[in-house]
C-alpha cells in the first residue's frame, strides 16, 4: 500500500544528449541549434545544458551546405555561426564554410574578417576562399597571389570547380576572354549537380557587373553603338554592356528600362530564346529578386525560360528572396503551378521544383505533403542527383511526425545514397538518434539495441568535428535503456581508457547506470559502482553539481543496501560534499539529508531520533520535496506499527499543507485505504469522502482510476450494489481509461455487482457475459496476475450458473475452462489464483456429490489435493460426509 514515489526517482538525472532535436530541419530551415536536454521531463537538479549538443553540429553539417546549394546563403551563414559556438566544434572547417556562405550572400567584408581570424591560414581551401573574397572586394592583385598559393590538387572536385572559376575571372580581367570562357565552362562541368552549376552561372553573371565605373566617353560610345545596331545581334550585345555600365553608375532604373525595351523587341521579332533568358537573368541580378522588374524578370525566366541552368539560377534567387510573405506565398504558387503543368512533366527542372516544394511544405508545417513531394521526385527520377536530398526531406518529415522508426530507416537510405563521406557519418547519427527516440516513445528495448548498434557504427567512423565523448555517452545510454546493464558497465570501463571520453560524460554514465541498477533492484551492484567512482579523483572540469548528485546517490544506496549507520554518516556529510554546488541546488540536496537520516533511524529502531530529524527537515526546508515526502515516510512507519490514527493524521497534514505538491493525491488515497482498513461504518464513509476529495481536487491524477475502483469496492462492501455498479460503469465508459492497466478489475467487479443482483435475469445475463469475457481474455497473460484473474472469473461464472440451477453449464466451465487449461496444462498459479482454483475444485466436487456422482467427485478432489491446493483431511471429510469412499 505504501509504495510512494521515492526521492531517488526525482533526484537522479538521466542526461540524454539530443543529437537531433532539430534534425527535422535537415534542409536548412533557419532556427536555433539543438541544446542538450532531458527527454524524460522536468527533474530535480537538472544540469545546465551545454550550448550546442551533437544535434547542432550534425544539423549544420547536413543542413547548411544544402541551404547554400539551394540559394539560401543567409540561412547557411546563420547556421554556421551558431555551430561555431558549440563546444568541440571544428573551427577551421566551419570558418571556411561560413566564409563561403557569406560570399554567396554578398557579405564579402564579413567573409574576409572570418578568414583573417581563422586558425587555418595555410590550406589550399583557405587560399581559395581568400582569393574569392579578394576578388569580391576588387583586390585583384591579392586575389592573384592567393590563386598562385592555392594547390588545386589538394581541393575536392567541387572546390576545384571554384578554383577554375577564380582563374577564369582573373583571365577575363587580364583580357584573355577565350581562356576565361574555357575556365568558366570547366567550373560548370565540375559542379556536382544542376543547382551547383546554377550557382556558378549566377556568380559569373554577378562578376560581370563588378567593373570600374565607365568613363563618360565609354558610356556615350556604348549608347551610340546600341542605338545604331538596335534589333541586330550586335545591338543586343551593346545593349547588355550598356545595361551593365548603367548599373555600375548607380542608374538601375535606366538599366532595367533598357533591358525591358530590348526584351520587348526580342519577343516581337521572335529573337533567340537564349538571348531572352540572358536578358531576363541580367534584369533579375540588377533589379534583385525581392520585387519589381527584377523579380518579374526572374519569374518569367523560371516559368518560360529555355536554358535549364539559367532557370535554376532564377529558382535559387527567388527562393532566397522569398523568406517572408507576400513573396513566399507567391513563390509557392509558382512552384505549384509549374509542378502541375503537363509541359513540365518531362522537364529536367521538375526534380528541382519538387525538392523546393517539399522544403516549402516542411516550412509550412505539412510533413505529409513534404514526404509526398519527395516521394514523387524519387519515383519520377530514381537516378536523380537530388536523391539524397529527397530522402533527407522524407527523414525530416517522418521525424516531425514522430515516426522515428521510419526516420531511422530513411536516414539509412540517405546514408547509402550520398557520396559525401561526412554526410554518411552524419546520417548515421540521425539514424542512431531516431532509434533512440523510438525507444523513448514506445519503450521497446529492441529500439534501444538498434540505437546502440548505430552509435557504435558512428563512433567507428565519426563525422569530422563531432564530439566523440557525447556519442560514446549516447551509446552507453542506449545499452542502459535496452536493459543490457552488464554491457553498459563493460562499455563504460572500456571507454574510460579512451582519451576522447571525458570524465564528465563518464560520471554521467556512471550515475545513470547506478540508477538503473537501483531501479532493477540490484542495490549492491549500484552501491559498489558509485563507491568505486567516488574513490577516484573527480578530474578537471567536473561540475560540482554532478559530484553532489553522486554523493547523494551514495547515501541513498547505503540505505537501500541496509547499511543504515553508513547511510546516517553519508547523509550527515552532504553539507560538506556540496560545498561548491550553487546555493539553490545545494539547498535542495541538503534537504534530502534529514529525510535519509529519518529513514535510517526508523530502520534502526530509533523512532524518537527519526521523528526529530524529520521535524527538523520540515522546519528548515518546509517547501522542499523532501519535506513533503517526510510525511509519507513517517506515516508509513506509523501504519506498519499499527498506529493508524497517527498515520492518517500525517497523511492529511500533507494533503492540507501541500495541496499543490506531487504527493497530495497519494496522501489522500493512502488515508482512504487506512480508513477502509479500520472497517467501521463511519470510517468506510470517511474513506469514500477522501476518495471524492481526491477525484475532485486532482481530476488528472494517475490515481483517479484506482480511487474510483476503490470507491466501488467500498460501496460493494456496504451492499450498495446499485451505486457500485454505476461507479464501475463510469470507469469503463470513460475514454480516458480505455487503456488503464487495471480496467479488467473494474470489469470483474462490475460482474460481481450484477451477480449479487442475479435474482433479476437481466443482471444474471450481464454478469455471465462479463465473467465470460474476462475468462477468455488471452491478452491477460502479459500481466503477472493475468491467469489468476481469469481463474477467478471462471470460478465465479460457474457459481453463477450453479445458483441459477444450470449445473451442466457450471460443470463445463469449472472443468473445461478453468481446471483443465489452468491447472492440468498451465504453469504455476499465484496465491490469488491458487485460492480461486481450490474453490473451483471444491465447487465442482460439491456439484458432483450432489448429483450422486461420488467417484467423479473423488477424482476431482484428488486432483486438487495432488496439486497442493486442498488439504488431505479436508478431502476425506468432504467425501465422508457424502458417504463416498475416502481416497486411498
Image (tube, helix red, strand yellow):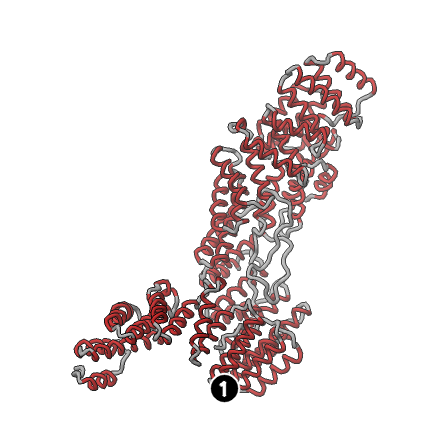
Q: Secondary structure at mark 1?
A: loop
In this view of the protein, can residue 499 be seen by the observer?
A: no
Counting labels gives 1
Residue 158 left/right relative to 140: left
**242 to the left or right of 825:** right
- Of 523 and 229, which appears nearest the observer? 229
Percent coordinates x, y for residue 451 in the rendering:
48, 53
Quadrant in which the C terminus appears: bottom left
| Residue placed under numbered mark 1 in the picture | 641
Q: Is residue 192 above or below residue 465?
A: above
> Of residues 382 and 690, which is closer to you in this image?
690
Quadrant of the rendered image containing residue 156: top right
Task: Return the x and y of residue 120 as percentages of the image width and height.
Answer: 66, 42
Q: Residue furthest right?
A: 216
Q: Is residue 725 left or right of residue 806?
A: right
Residue in front for this viewpoint, 504 or 438: 438
**Quarter location, residue 593:** bottom right
Q: Is residue 427 above or below residue 504?
A: above
Look at the picture and state if 61 lies above or below 875.
Answer: above
Q: Residue at x 68, y 19 (%)?
A: 177
Question: Percent x, y for residue 409?
Answer: 47, 46
Residue 479 seen anywhere in this rendered image of the structure: yes
338 versus 885 height, above or below: above
- The front one of 120 and 599 is 599
Which residue appears at 63% of the width and 56% of the height? 50
x and y, in percent, of residue 62 in the image: 57, 43
Badge 1 local density, few (<14 within 10 Å), some, or many (20+)? Answer: few
- Hey, which quadrant is residue 617 in on the image? bottom right
Amino acid at each position: 500500500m505504501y509504495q510512494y514515489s521515492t526521492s531517488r526517482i526525482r533526484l537522479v538525472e538521466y542526461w540524454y544528449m539530443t543529437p537531433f532535436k532539430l534534425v527535422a530541419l535537415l534542409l536548412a530551415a533557419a532556427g536555433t541549434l539543438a541544446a542538450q536536454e532531458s527527454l524524460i521531463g522536468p527533474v530535480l537538479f537538472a544540469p545546465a545544458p551545454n550550448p550546442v549538443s551533437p544535434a547542432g553540429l550534425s544539423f549544420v553539417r547536413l543542413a547548411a551546405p544544402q541551404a547554400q546549394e539551394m540559394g539560401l546563403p543567409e540561412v547557411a551563414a546563420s547556421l554556421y555561426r551558431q555551430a561555431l559556438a558549440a563546444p568541440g566544434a571544428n573551427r577551421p572547417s566551419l570558418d571556411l564554410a561560413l566564409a563561403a556562405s557569406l560570399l554567396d550572400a554578398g557579405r564579402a567584408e564579413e567573409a574576409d574578417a572570418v578568414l583573417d581570424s581563422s586558425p587555418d591560414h595555410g590550406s589550399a581551401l583557405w587560399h581559395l576562399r581568400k582569393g574569392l573574397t579578394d576578388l569580391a572586394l576588387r583586390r585583384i592583385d591579392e586575389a592573384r597571389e592567393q590563386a598562385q598559393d592555392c594547390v588545386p590538387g589538394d581541393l575536392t572536385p567541387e572546390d576545384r570547380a571554384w578554383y577554375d572559376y577564380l582563374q577564369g575571372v582573373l583571365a577575363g580581367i587580364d583580357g584573355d576572354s577565350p581562356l576565361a570562357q574555357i575556365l568558366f565552362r570547366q567550373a560548370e562541368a565540375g559542379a556536382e549537380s544542376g543547382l551547383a552549376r546554377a550557382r556558378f552561372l549566377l556568380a559569373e553573371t554577378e562578376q560581370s557587373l563588378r567593373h570600374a565605373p565607365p568613363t563618360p566617353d565609354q558610356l556615350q560610345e556604348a549608347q551610340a553603338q546600341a542605338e545604331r545596331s538596335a534589333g541586330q545581334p550586335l545591338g543586343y550585345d551593346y545593349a547588355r554592356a550598356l545595361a551593365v555600365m548603367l548599373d555600375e553608375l548607380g542608374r538601375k532604373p535606366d538599366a532595367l528600362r533598357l533591358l525591358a525595351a530590348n526584351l520587348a523587341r526580342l519577343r516581337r521579332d521572335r529573337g533567340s530564346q537564349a538571348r531572352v533568358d540572358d536578358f531576363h537573368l541580367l534584369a533579375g541580378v540588377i533589379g534583385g529578386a525581392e520585387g519589381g522588374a527584377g523579380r518579374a524578370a526572374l519569374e518569367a525566366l523560371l516559368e518560360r525560360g529555355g536554358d535549364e541552368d539559367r532557370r535554376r539560377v532564377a529558382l535559387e534567387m527567388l527562393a532566397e528572396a522569398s523568406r517572408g510573405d507576400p513573396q513566399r506565398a507567391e513563390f509557392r504558387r509558382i512552384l505549384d503551378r509549374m509542378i502541375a503543368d503537363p509541359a513540365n512533366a518531362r522537364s529536367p527542372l521538375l526534380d528541382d521544383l519538387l525538392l523546393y516544394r517539399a522544403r516549402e511544405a516542411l516550412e509550412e508545417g505539412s510533413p505529409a505533403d513534404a514526404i509526398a513531394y519527395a516521394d514523387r521526385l524519387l519515383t519520377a527520377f530514381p537516378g536523380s542527383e537530388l536523391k539524397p536530398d529527397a530522402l533527407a526531406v522524407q527523414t525530416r518529415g517522418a521525424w516531425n511526425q514522430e515516426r522515428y522508426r521510419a526516420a531511422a530507416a530513411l536516414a539509412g537510405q540517405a546514408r547509402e545514397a550520398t557520396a559525401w563521406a561526412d554526410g554518411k557519418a552524419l546520417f548515421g547519427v540521425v539514424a542512431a538518434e531516431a532509434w533512440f527516440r523510438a525507444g523513448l516513445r514506445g519503450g521497446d528495448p529492441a529500439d534501444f539495441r538498434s540505437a546502440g548498434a548505430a552509435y557504435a557504427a558512428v563512433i567507428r567512423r565519426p563525422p569530422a568535428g563531432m564530439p566523440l565523448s557525447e556519442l560514446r555517452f549516447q551509446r552507453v545510454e542506449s545499452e542502459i535503456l535496452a536493459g543490457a546493464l552488464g554491457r553498459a558497465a563493460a562499455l563504460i570501463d572500456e571507454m574510460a581508457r579512451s582519451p576522447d571520453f571525458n570524465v564528465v560524460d563518464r560520471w554521467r554514465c556512471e550515475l545513470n547506470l547506478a540508477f538503473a541498477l537501483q531501479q532493477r533492484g540490484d542495490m549492491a551492484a549500484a552501491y559498489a559502482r558509485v563507491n568505486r567512482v567516488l574513490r577516484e579523483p573527480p578530474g578537471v572540469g567536473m561540475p560540482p553539481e554532478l559530484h553532489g548528485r553522486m554523493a547523494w546517490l551514495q547515501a541513498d544506496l547505503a540505505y537501500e543496501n541496509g547499511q543504515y549507520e553508513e547511510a546516517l554518516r553519508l547523509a550527515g556529510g552532504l553539507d560538506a560534499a556540496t560545498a561548491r554546488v550553487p546555493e539553490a541546488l545545494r539547498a535542495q540536496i541538503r534537504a534530502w539529508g534529514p529525510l535519509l537520516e529519518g529513514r535510517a533511524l526508523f530502520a534502526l529502531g530509533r523512532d524518537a531520533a527519526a521523528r526529530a530529524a524529520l521535524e527538523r527537515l520540515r522546519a528548515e526546508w518546509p517547501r522542499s520535496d523532501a519535506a513533503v515526502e517526510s510525511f509519507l515516510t513517517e506515516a508509513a512507519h506509523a501504519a506498519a506499527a499499527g498506529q493508524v490514527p497517527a498515520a492518517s493524521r500525517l497523511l492529511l497534514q500533507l494533503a492540507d499543507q501541500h495541496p499543490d505538491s506531487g504527493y497530495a493525491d497519494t496522501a489522500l488515497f493512502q488515508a482512504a485505504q487506512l480508513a477502509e482498513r479500520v472497517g467501521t461504518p463511519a470510517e468506510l464513509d470517511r474513506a469514500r469522502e477522501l476518495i471524492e476529495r481526491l477525484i475532485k481536487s486532482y481530476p488528472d491524477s494517475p490515481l483517479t482510476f484506482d480511487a474510483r475502483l476503490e470507491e466501488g469496492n467500498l460501496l460493494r462492501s456496504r451492499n450498495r450494489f446499485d451505486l457500485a455498479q454505476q461507479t464501475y460503469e463510469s470507469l469503463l465508459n470513460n475514454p480516458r481509461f480505455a487503456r488503464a492497466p487495471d480496467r479488467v478489475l473494474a470489469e470483474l467487479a462490475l460482474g460481481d455487482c450484477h451477480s449479487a443482483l442475479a435474482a433479476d435475469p437481466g443482471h444474471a445475463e450481464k454478469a455471465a457475459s462479463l465473467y465470460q469475457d474476462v475468462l477468455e481474455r488471452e491478452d491477460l497473460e502479459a500481466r503477472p496476475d493475468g491467469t489468476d484473474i481469469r481463474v477467478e472469473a471462471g470460478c465465479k461464472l460457474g457459481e453463477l450458473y450453479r445458483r441459477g440451477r444450470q449445473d451442466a453449464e457450471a460443470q463445463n466451465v469449472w472443468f473445461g475452462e478453468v481446471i483443465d487449461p489452468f491447472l492440468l496444462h498451465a504453469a504455476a498459479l499465484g496465491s490469488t489464483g491458487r485460492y480461486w482454483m481450490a474453490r473451483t475444485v471444491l465447487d465442482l466436487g460439491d456439484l458432483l456429490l450432489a448429483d450422486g456422482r461420488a467417484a467423479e467427485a473423488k477424482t476431482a478432489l484428488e486432483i486438487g489435493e495432488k496439486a497442493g491446493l486442498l488439504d488431505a483431511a479436508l478431502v476425506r471429510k468432504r467425501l465422508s460426509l457424502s458417504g463416498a469412499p475416502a481416497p486411498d
